[in-house]
Image: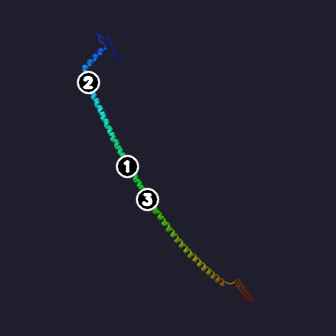
Amino acid sequence: MAKKQTRNQGGLTTDNVDGNVDKIREILFGGQMRDYEQRFADLETRLTKNIELISSNFEKRMDRLDTFAKRELDKLAEQVKDERKARRDEGKEGSKELKGLTQQLESWCAELEEQIGSETQELRGLLQEQGEELSGMVSDTHDQLSKSLAAETRSLADGKLAREDLATLLAELSSRLKKDSKSSGA
């Protein structure tokens, strides 16, 4: 508020009244106000110290947490590194085992092919021998059947009457029958 200098009754100005009020206040509340101000100053000092202490503790804890986090991250990184190395080693061992199995399989396949080839040759030889035997048997059977057929043909040829002989025989029989029928009927 702006202080106005006005004259009151009795010649007192507003400034004088305000000054008197301040003096009265100082007399009545001065000790308490100074006590409050001292308390506020002490409180402010304590709060400042506590805030600084809390800030310092917080910074220390953050530093410890940061250090702990770095250590843990380093441990995890080392574990990951060890795990990668172990997996690479396992991969190499697996690769070696796979190569060994591949070589063993290839050798088994080669042995099997060789065995199949030799058995195939044996079977071809056996089939050829049996084919030759069967061919010989067929040839022998053909020869025997041909001989038997020729013998039977000759036998039938020898045993059958010739046409001319049969015609002569029938002609003679016919003439005898005619003679007999004339002699018996005559």
Name the quadrant containing residue 55.
Answer: top left
Distance (Cα) linking label 3 and label 1? 27 Å
Q: Which residue is mark 2?
A: 34
Position of 13 relative to 115 (above/below): above
Checking the image for residue 78, the label placed there is 1
Q: Nearer the viewer, residue 2 or 117?
A: 2
Residue type highlighted by circle 1: Glu
- Nearer-the-camera pick, 153 or 103: 103
In the foreground, 132 or 177: 132
Name the amino acid, label 2: Arg
Q: CA distance from mark 3 to mark 2?
A: 91 Å
Residue 133 image point, x, y percent: 56, 76
Asked which secondary structure carries label 3, the reply is: helix
The C terminus - image quarter: bottom right
Relative side of 179 to 43, left or right = right
Label 3 belongs to which residue? Answer: 96
- Residue 182: x and y in percent read 74, 88
If the image is split into quadrants, where does the N terminus sit?
Answer: top left
Picture residue at 25% right of the left edge, 21% below the top: 30
Q: Dot 1 surroundings within 10 Å: few (below 14), some, or many (20 or more)?
A: few
Task: State the residue at coordinates (28%, 18%).
Answer: 22
Mark-to-mark CA distance, 2 and 1 = 64 Å
Residue for point 61% across, 79% down: 143
- C-beta proximity under 8 Å, tags 2 and 1: no
**Which class describes the residues within 10 Å of circle 3: few (<14), some (14-19), or many (20+)?**
few
Q: How many marks?
A: 3
